[in-house]
Image: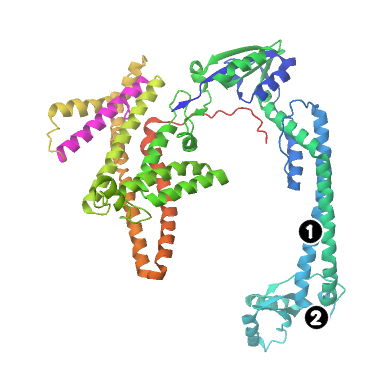
Amino acid sequence: MAVSTMQAVNVIGVVDDIDDVISVLGESGVFHPDDVPAFYSDTKNFTHLQTKNIYAEPLTNLKASIGLTKRKFPLIDVSDFNPSFKEMEIFATNTAKEIDALVDDREFITEQLIEAKESLNDTKHFVGLGVETEKLLTLKYLKTRFGRLPKESYEKLSAYKDNPYIDFTICTEDKSHYWGVYFAPVNNCDEIDRIFSGLYFEKCDVLGVNDTPRVHLQKLQELVPKLDAKLSESQKRLDSYLDMHAERITRYLSKLEELYLYAKIRTKALQYNRSFIIVGWVPTEFAKPLKRRLKKISSVSVELSDAKKEIEKSPPVKLKNCFLAKPFEFYTEMYGVPKYNEIDPSLFIAITYIIIFGIMFADLGQGICLSIAGLLMWKLKKMKIGKILFPCGISSAVFGTFFGSVFGFEHLLDPMYKALFGLEEKPFEVMTSDSIITILLSAVGIGVLLVIVAMSLNVYSSCKQHNIGQALFSPSGVAGIVFYSSVIFGTVGQLFLGWNVFSLPYILGMIVLPYLLIFFSEPLSNLIAGEKDWKPESWGGYIMEHLIESIEFLLEYVTNTVSFLRVGAFVLVHAGMMMVVFVLAETAGAIAYWPVIVLGNAFVMVLEALLVSIQVLRLEYYEMFNRFYSGEGRPYEPIKLNLD
């Protein structure tokens, strides 16, 4: 549970050398720029070197035009390619215009082709008309409506036989509709349109042409192949242009991307007279090599300082974890990265998440399937959740072996237990009444242990941040640990073991005293911190306010503990759902038995994997994280060009 150590970098030099400095910082790929005012309190006489990223517009225009081609151009190393901004701007503008012209030509032909195909599709339904379409559409006293009418609606036209204007001329038909035309006098047009609309008539826009539909159809059938050929030629011209200029486009695009990123450093730099100041952060292992490179620039002065001494400047955080915890950085970052002097909870999440998931989703067969699914999700789709599901599936398989469940078969592993341990059957039957109580109490026990661990992490994290008051007196500090542990120990001893734990000295020393320390944590913390005004303005007001707060943290202890009942509940839910699957399989009969078993397992596996993943994450965030973790840090985001 650690973060990479960082160094604050302060670079001062002559403005004439700033481009060289920015190139070194950018090419390093490890420099995280920061705001100069965060490092210097008085910057009123400083001015910004550049407020606008001048590379944004040419880069955006070039990328937009390239995007229309659907062609990908990989980013390459262009450290040896140094055109002027004017050259890059001219290239980006001219190239974008040429690409846009070729793309516009392609799109124009594409639109013609689409229009021709749609017209062809519409026209073929009206080949029965022997009249030129244009003449029907330009009648002076009649409106013409082409379209299709459901066959069941056509039968309803008989209800309007007394209306001489309600008539539908059929041209063609398909399985569900008649295609044809109706005519409406201009004066009655709205009424007739409403009637046909009520019969679900769907209007079809047939273009007016000086041909009969049959002749027009023949012309369209000849036109479509020609447009296809023109479209192919247009695409070839575009491809030929891109092939011819691929190298130049790649180099200029890469250079613009690089300089666009580097300009982010320039926009944060401040100028004072003829000097500039750039500040930022680098991981400790890269600090000295970067300083040596910068010192080669004659006018440049570089200062490094340990981030531990610059905590008030909120150093960025780069998580550094072992192979087990690395995938769970995904969950840490979802909540928020730690502050630089705060512990990284990724390893804690990894261990607790994997174990709790395995208990709640305990099945040997389904666990193995889940691991395989997680591995494929990561390898094929690069889904971060896949790397998390893989160890969780293994944990499920391990606990499934303990509970004796393999795809819901509860006694399939009995021969293994007999061979290894001499047992006739598995040692733990989930669905018996005694086992249910044991499972639920064990779940609460796990919750108590994890809550105490979370409080202990808070003590460690608070000491690391030099917040001794919080470490000692907060509800998740030493006083909180003593209070919570004493109540739990006393309750278990009194109710389950028959011990007389709650004696007067025990209550006063282990419960009342820690409670009072928590209650007065604010003034006590201020007193330890050496603040002169450590007393509250009004003791009466303080007591009234903190009486309510004390009720809140007491309820929090209870809810945090009871919330872990869901761990045991899901063990029972899994067994219950698989029992339902087997009941359905037996009801379905011999032929459908195995299909039902397979489909049931698949359904339970997907549903329960989703629910368990969410519930375990909820336990992490709401029952444990809020006791020791703030997640108020900021991520380390170095200026770095990711080459393809």
Q: Residue furthest bottom?
A: 162
Q: Residue at x 13, y 30 (%)?
A: 503
Crowd rating for badge 1 (residues with CA inside 10 Å; few <14, some 14–19, many 20+): few
| Secondary-structure class at tag 2 | loop
Q: Quadrant of the N terminus?
A: top left
Name the residue located 49 percent from the left edge and 41 percent from the top edge: 387
Q: Is residue 519 visible?
A: no
The disc placed on residue 129 is 2
Counting from the top left corner in percent of width and height, residue 112 is at 81, 60
| Residue 182 position in % (x across, y down) | 74, 80
Magenta part of the chain: 467-495
Q: Is residue 16 above or below residue 488?
A: above
Asked if the magenta segment contains residue 324, the reply would be no
Q: Amino acid at mark 2?
A: Leu
The quadrant the C terminus occupies is top right
**Residue at 33% over, 31% down:** 453
Q: How are the colours assigned in the image?
A: rainbow
The location of residue 13, given as percent across then percent down, is 68, 13
Q: Are marks 2 and 1 in contact (CB under 8 Å)?
A: no
Looking at the rendered structure, which numbered label has been put on residue 111?
Answer: 1
Residue situated in front as seen by the camera: 274 or 360 = 360
Q: Position of residue 487 (x, y in %)?
A: 22, 34
What secondary structure prevails in the magenta region? helix
Please tell me which residue lies in front, 629 or 209. Answer: 629
Furthest residue toward right: 210
Quick check: 274 left or right of 501? right
